[in-house]
Image (cartoon, helix red, strand yellow):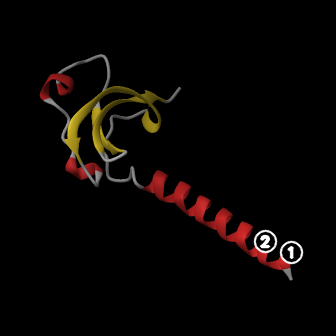
Amino acid sequence: MKKNIILLILLTLVIIALSLLVNQKENYKGIDLPANYTLENYSVAEVLDISCDLHSDCETPVDYAIRSNCPYTALCLKNKCTVVCPSQKI
């Protein structure tokens, strides 16, 4: 009986973890990036002092938008707007 309860708890935790991973990847849908760029890997350029709940709550600051070394975009990460540089697909 105890083994069944432990297995049920472990299975529940695995399902929750998988759903969080799927939701995290789907969370980037609707974010426009140039061809050959992806948000699966990115580097953080700056964490802004702006609270957020959704990616749509964040705007890329103009000084990043005009830079040509990376297609910077702002994402909501850990409830703070964060400017990131997406990785380029090879």
Q: Amino acid at mark 2?
A: Ile
Q: What is the crowding at mark 1: few (fewer than 14 residues within 10 Å), some, or many (at least 20)?
A: few
* Left or right side of 75 for 16: right
Q: Badge 1 is on which residue? A: 3
Q: Residue furthest top?
A: 69
In which quadrant is the N terminus drawn?
A: bottom right
Q: Residue furthest left?
A: 62
Q: Residue at x 15, y 22 (%)?
A: 63
Q: CA distance from mark 2 to mark 1?
A: 5 Å
The picture quadrant where one finds residue 71 is top left
Q: Residue at x 71, y 71 (%)?
A: 9
Percent across and percent down for residue 40 are 49, 39
Toward the viewer: 59 or 17?
17
* Left or right side of 53 for 10: right
Percent across and percent down for residue 12 are 66, 70
Toward the viewer: 63 or 12?
12
* Left or right side of 29 for 15: right
Toward the viewer: 20 or 27?
20
Percent across and percent down for residue 8 are 74, 75
In the image, which disc is placed on residue 37?
none
Q: Amino acid at mark 1?
A: Lys
Q: Is residue 5 above or below residue 65?
A: below
Q: Residue at x 18, y 40 (%)?
A: 59
Percent across and percent down for residue 83 are 29, 32
Q: Residue at x 38, y 35 (%)?
A: 35
Q: Is residue 84 above or below residue 4?
A: above
The picture quadrant where one finds residue 3 is bottom right
Q: Residue furthest front?
A: 2
Q: Is residue 42 above or below residue 11?
A: above
In the image, which disc is placed on residue 6?
2
